[in-house]
Each structure stands twice: as C-alpha cells, then as structure tokens.
Image (tube, rainbow, N blue to C red):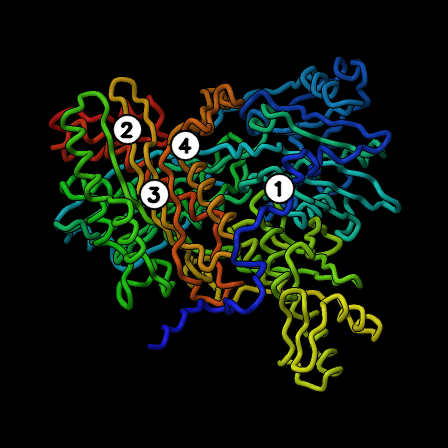
Amino acid sequence: MNAPEKLMLPGTRPDTEPAAAAGVSRAHESARAQVRGGATYVDDITELRGTLHAAPILSTVAHGRLRGVDSAEALAMPGVRGIVLGRDIPGDPTLASFTGDEPIFASDTVQHVGQVVGLVLATDTMAARRAARKVRLQIDALPAILTTQQAMQAESFVLPPVFVRRGDAKAALAQAPHRLSGTLEVGGQEHFYLEGQVAYVVPQEQNQWLVYSSTQHPGEVQHWVAHALGIDNHGVRVECRRMGGGFGGKETQAGHLAVWSAIAAAKYHCPVKLRLDRDDDFMITGKRHPFSYQYTVGYDDSGRLCGLQLALAANCGFSADLSGPVADRAVFHCDNAYYLADVEIASYRCKTNTQSHTAFRGFGGPQGVILIETILGDIARVLGLDPLDVRRRNLYGIDERNVTHYQMPVEDNILQPLIDQLAQSARYEPRRAAIADWNRSSAVIKRGIALTPVKFGISFTATLFNQAGALVHVYTDGSVQVNHGGTEMGQGLNTKVAQVVADELGVPFDKVLATASDTSKIPNASATAASAGTDLNGRAAQFAARNVRDNLAQFVCGLDGCGAGAIRFAGGQVISPKATRSFEEVVRLAYANRIQLWSDGFYRTPKIHYDKTTLTGRPFFYFAYGAACTEVAIDTLTGESRVLKVDILHDVGRSINPAIDIGQIEGGFVQGMGWLTTEQLVWNDKGLLTTHAPSTYKIPATGDIPEHFTVELWPEPNREDNVFGSKAVGEPPFMLAISVYEALRAAAGAVDPDGHMPIQLSAPATAENVLSALPRRGG
C-alpha cells in the first residue's frame, strides 16, 4: 500500500531541502548582547566633549496665561549653562504635526500640568534637573476642562465629531423584542517602556544635524527637527538602532525630545542630550486614550443584536496628536467579531487640559472592542444565557452577514472554528459548570470564566503610510547586510526580516545582519506601528534580496547555459542543472564580472482604500483573529482579584518565528490585563496626574502571571499574499485580555447568580471598582 502524500503548506520545502531560516524559532538577534549589557541604546552612546544635558521646565497649572519665566536662581546654580525658551526657536514655533495645533514650547498659554515651557542646560543631568525645578513660572490660572463629561458639556473638541451609520438603528430599536441602555468608563494606560524618552543631538558641518532618537518613527523626527530649525529635511539625519520598548508612546512623542534637544544644540552650538526621568516622562507624555461610552441596544430572546446606538467619547488631552486615527480605529473595531446590521455610531474627540494622549498598542482598537464585548455580556446576564452562546449567535458569517459597518467584506473569517477549538481544548463548558458549583458553596471567594474573541484589522488606517523600503547589500565574502525603514523595539522585527532575507538568498541565518534604522538610507519611512512592521519592511527587504538573487541567477545561467528559473539558492549553495557552487564563490565570480550585488526593494500594501469623511471602504488588508479563555477569582470582602488560568488560541498565519510570536502574544495579553485590572491613572481636581511613578502606578508583575498560561497558534497561512504567509502579531493579542474583564464581571455577578441587572464595572477593575460593582442580591 502506498504511503499517503505528505501535506505541504504553501512555501514550505521538502524534507530533502536544507533547513529554512524562516518558519522556525530563533533567538532575537540582539538577545545575547542585551543580557550581557552589550546592546547599545541612545543613553549608552559615548558623549562627545562639550555635551550639555537638558532638563524640562514644566507647567504647574492645568490651564492658564503664562506671564513670565524667572530663571535667575536656576542660572546661578553650579554647572548650569543656560536656558531655552520659545523665543530661541529658529524655525516654526509649532510642531510639524498633521493638525499643527501643538506649540513646541508653551509661550502665552499653558494647557496642562507638565507642559514643557523650556529647558535648562547644564554640564550633567542631575544639575540640569535640579536647576529646572528652581525656575519660577508666573501663571494666571484659567478654568480647566479635565474630564470627557466636562468637554462634552462645553463642546470642547480637538477635532470634529464623526458619525457612521448603517441601516436604520432607530427603527430597529423600536421593533426589537428587548432593549437595554448603559454606560461604561474605561481608563487610559501609561506606556511604561523600560527605556524612557531620550534624544541626543550632535551638530555636524554646514548646518547639518545628527539625531540619535529612541523613536518608532525616525522619518517624522527628521521632519519635525528640520521644521523647528528652519532647514530642509536633508540637513537632518536620524538614527535609531533599538528602543527599550515603545508600545506607541514613541511614535510621535519621541519627536518632542529630539526637537527640544535640537533647538538647544542650535542655540549653544554643542551636542545636547535630553533624557527624561520617570516622573517627568509620566507628567509630559500622553497615554492610551481614556474613553467614556453610552449605548442603547436592541436584541431578541436568543441575544442576537437587532439595533445599536453607540456614543464614544475619547479624552484626547490638549492637542490632537494621533487622536483622529485612534478614534477612527475605535469606530472600526466596535464590531469586533460581530455583525452589526442596523447601527449608529457617534465618535467625539474631546479636548481636555491633560497630557496629549497618543498611540498605544491597539491604537483605539481595544477601546472599540471592549464596548461591544461589554454589551454582549450585559445581554447575556439580562437574559440568563451563557455569554459565549450570545457571542456565537452574533459572529460574522460566511457568505452572509459578512460585511462590516464600514462596508468591508470579511473574507478570511475563521472565528467559528477557532472559538470552537479553544472552547473544547480549554474545557470551557465543564469548567463553567464547576465554577458555578464552587460559587454556590463559597461565600467570600467567587470565580468567573469568560471566552472572548478578537478580529483585528491590519494596515495603517491612513493609507499613505502603507509603504516601505529596504536595502540589501551582499559583500564579496558572501555576508549580507539589510537595512529597512522599520525600528526595533524588542519585538523581533530585525530578526524576522533577517530570516526572510536569508531564505530569499538561500544563505544561513547568521550570514545576515540587520542594521540601525537611518533616514539617510531609507527616506520617508512610515512609523513602526499598526502591527505592520514585518508586513511592510519584511516584504520590502524580501523584494530587495530577490533582486540581488535574480542578478546572481542570471549570471550563473550564463555560465552554465541554462534558464535562470533553473537556478536554486538553498543551504548556502547556488545549484544549477550543471553545477553546485557555494554562495560565496558565486558572489566572488559575480563581482569579478561587475554584477550588481546590492539592491533596493519597495512594497506598498495592495487592495486598501477608504473614504476618510464617511469612514467607509477597505481600510485593512486582512484581519488577524484569536480567542482567549480566562478564569479569575475575586474576594468579595476586599475587591482583590487574581487571574487563575489563561488559554489562548491565536492566528498569526504561517509564523516566521514561532517563539517570537508566542512571546508577543503572551506580552500583549499581560499588558492588556494590566490596562483592565491594576493600571489606574488618577488626575486630581487641579489637573495633576497623581499616579506618576511605580509607587502609585502598578503594572503587572511576575506574581500576577497565572501558573496556567497556554498559547497555541492557529495552523493556517494568511489567505492574503503576505510575506511568508504570516500575519501581524504585535497588537491583536492585547485585546484577548478583555476576557479577564469579562471573567471578573462574571465573578462579580456570582454574588447574585439569579440577578438580571448588568454588572457595572469601570475599568481598570481595581479592588475599589470591583467592590463597587458587586450586586445586591435580587438586583
């Protein structure tokens, strides 16, 4: 009997071929250097003689008129060399952001506690920081808007409201068998990157500037610095070898430090470094946008949605920053995995006198997803149904009920089989029954379980950013260098790109070196954000390597008298029907025959388009899917909670590096868990952020990680033509942590298992908020 034919995934090699670089777990390219302390970050770069250190002068008032700056005491302190204010800006005093609504330094008006008014320059960091605190600001206080509710009442917006409609929500609600209205408050989140914000600016000859910046967007830093200095972009070179974390907090706001440092360097004609301490970083930089919600939903006896009205109010802070696209993505993701037939969405972008909130992992997606998951959880409790059953009844379908509220067909839907597989492997139903038994016999400790999915769109919603470039150089010894426009922040981008390039050239992984992001090599690069780093830069690098490979193949076919398509590159060898040569030998021969051994590559994402005014079209190339099943326990006397078990099944397509992808899934989930449980931002009635240090702001620690924490990868390549058949992995897992929030609500509801009132739990679910959410029996 013949053996069955082995199933091969697209792009995989037969067992007889050499092992590929991609598709297997490999250590992060900088891992060894990082654990040995040999990986260079901006603050590790050797400082040139004459370098001055800057510290920010911060507003102490949330809103007011700036009458004067008294720096006499500061200037008299040891080591202090001077002060920089708005009047010292050589170019435009407004940051070169899309909306142009943020001053480089506060001049006439201050708009939040912590807004930067200027800098103090000194010979060392601590001298500068001590002196900055001695600068006296004369500010006449003005009324401040500190909450979304106050902003809505005052109609205070950084951008106009946006409305999206499909069908007739009002009529659908009127005809629905059941209706429910509710509100929800979800807090922001501090990025808490391990490496704080930092920039080092070094003057070069002829009014040129070298900027070392811990940034996710070197091209934007280049543009902002040039704009502030009043010079062309080509006069500024920005380099970033790596960041110690970014999470979106270094997408735009790293640019501020570079601009401030450059202005100081221009005034004092010397290198300037600015590194924020943790407290100042908290006080100056924006966070994940806090959101306030109102909803009215209609539904039938099975929990299927009939009509929906949503109002989303984002606290944007004092300027727009990226609030427009963040709020847009919240609108795009308030369906999550569910079909919304008749829906009306209002999105408000509220201006408040707080830090200007910015990008954060998920970029508004989590704030959209949590709303619809909360609504479905509320419906399930009111009807006395299993929340998972309600979720299943509302899922997008195949060939029907498969178009989003923004008119994009869902063509790659794997939600039903993925959820079913996780429910079975995590033993959702028997565990839910066992938890119900536990809760009946436990008076104080209550448990809850929830299984929630995610459907996350992959691409920048601003279509123009969906492009990337790369350079691949092959040297005469056969070693390979790749440079691309993406930035490495610990997520493994350079490792994955090197794997892709190694396979394209058929060389071992250790022959490929990825180098620092550099605006003098790849111009106009998009931010490393929107989970698209590998999709964009990996594909561009693949195309660049393919060009070099084609040059070599054409050369070898001339030597051996065969077609170029007959040449194979694998295992460090170049194989033709007539000869097998080492890659190094072919490279040396090609160089001797003046064959080009380097190339650029360019990629732009296909198929995407959308109308920014109506928020309709196809903003995403594809969707990434996943689901998490989480079990929690709460103490009903103290409100304390603990995550007991987590099971995740996530869709990364055909994984380029499974170890890195699983690490991203685990890290994203834990960061999302922090957002929804312990990470509480508190502003007092004066607009002061009171949780501005690790002593008062609590990110998850090792003790918060459940002992049972499993991650499995969905075994199917991307159905779209993406690099290696992979899918983006940076952001989608973050939203899997909404299962924690829903499990906590289930545990709180167990206090009154026969109750039918929704559990009103504000996020984060701190002990205080959990206690407040506990229902009274019979409620």
Question: Tag 1, which secondary structure?
Answer: helix
- What x and y, as percent, mark residue 263? 76, 36
Q: Is residue 64 left or right of residue 79?
A: left
Residue at 67% x, 24% y is 57
Q: Say which of marks 1 and 2 sits in front.
A: 1
The three-letter amino acid code for the residue at tag 3 is Asp
What residue lies at 17% left-to-right and 38% top-to-bottom? 433
Q: Amino acid at mark 1?
A: Ala
Residue receiving disc 2:
633
Q: Mark 2, residues whose alpha carbon is within 10 Å: few (<14), some, or many (≥20)? A: many
Which type of secondary structure does the marked residue at label 3 adopt? strand
Residue at 15%, 43% in the rendered image:
385
Q: Residues within 10 Å of mark 4 (few under 14, many from 20)?
A: some
Residue wearing tag 4: 705
- Mark 3 to mark 2 CA distance (whole Å): 16 Å
Q: Which residue position is annotated with label 1? A: 31
Whichever of callouts 3 and 4 sits on the residue coming sooner in the sequence is 3
- Decide which of tag 1 and tag 3 comes sooner along the chain: 1
Check disc 3 and report the residue beneath it: 647
Q: Which label's residue is closer to the chain start, 3 or 2? A: 2
Q: CA distance from mark 1 to mark 3?
A: 27 Å
